[in-house]
Amino acid sequence: MAKNLLAGFLGLIAFMASSLALSAPASADTVTFRVQSLYQYKVQIEFYSQARDAAWPGNGNAYNLDDYDTHAFTLECVTGEQICYGAWVTGDDSQYWGVGNNNQYSCDSCCLVCGKGEGPVFTLNP
């Protein structure tokens, strides 16, 4: 009886391990955006996947840029996915850079590909 119980327990562990392996992302990687705001007022920025419903930091939040320093944002992402930044003046998202607030616009050069390392410095000019 103990032998059957042990075999059943080991089978359950094997099943659970295979289920966890199936739910893992295809390939986790990172990409680093470097951003400098030269705008005179505070700016907010968020990053959006163009391949899936994902944003960094996500959940209705944004990173604050409140100085003229270059800030680095390293994002965990899926290898090969395109990620674009969207930035806007705090309290006035009608003034924006990249894809803007909530990924609502298109852009020519505001995206990086996950797994390609660190991109150039994106400068938000007035």
Image: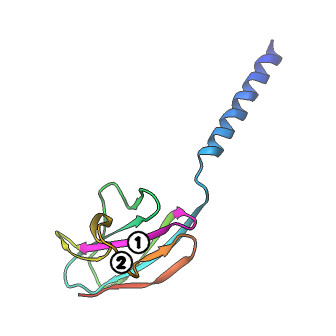
* Residue located 25% across and 73% down the image: 88
* Residue located 76% across and 18% down the image: 5
Q: Are there few (<14), some (14-19), or many (20+) residues within 10 Å of tag 2?
A: some
Circle 2/circle 1 CB separation < 8 Å? yes
User: Which SS type dominates the magenta stretch?
Assistant: strand
- Is residue 108 positioned above or below 101 on the image? below
Mark on residue 84? 1
Q: Which residue position is annotated with label 2?
A: 107
Q: In this view, does 55 lie to the left or right of 38?
A: right
> For the magenta stretch, what is the residue range?
77-88
Closer to the N terminus: mark 2 or mark 1?
1
Q: Is mark 1 on a helix, strand or loop?
A: strand
Q: Is mark 2 on a helix, strand or loop?
A: loop
Q: In this view, does 123 lie to the left or right of 18?
A: left
Place of residue 102 in the rendered image (x, y in percent of width and height, measured from the top left): 30, 63
Most distant residue in the right direction: 3
Cα distance between the residues tagged 2 and 1: 8 Å
Place of residue 65 in the rendered image (x, y in percent of width and height, measured from the top left): 29, 75
Q: In this view, does 47 lie to the left or right of 17?
A: left
Which amino acid lies under the numbered mark 2 shown in the image of this protein? Cys
Place of residue 116 in the rendered image (x, y in percent of width and height, measured from the top left): 57, 76
Viewer-nearest of discs 2 and 1: 2
Mark on residue 119? none
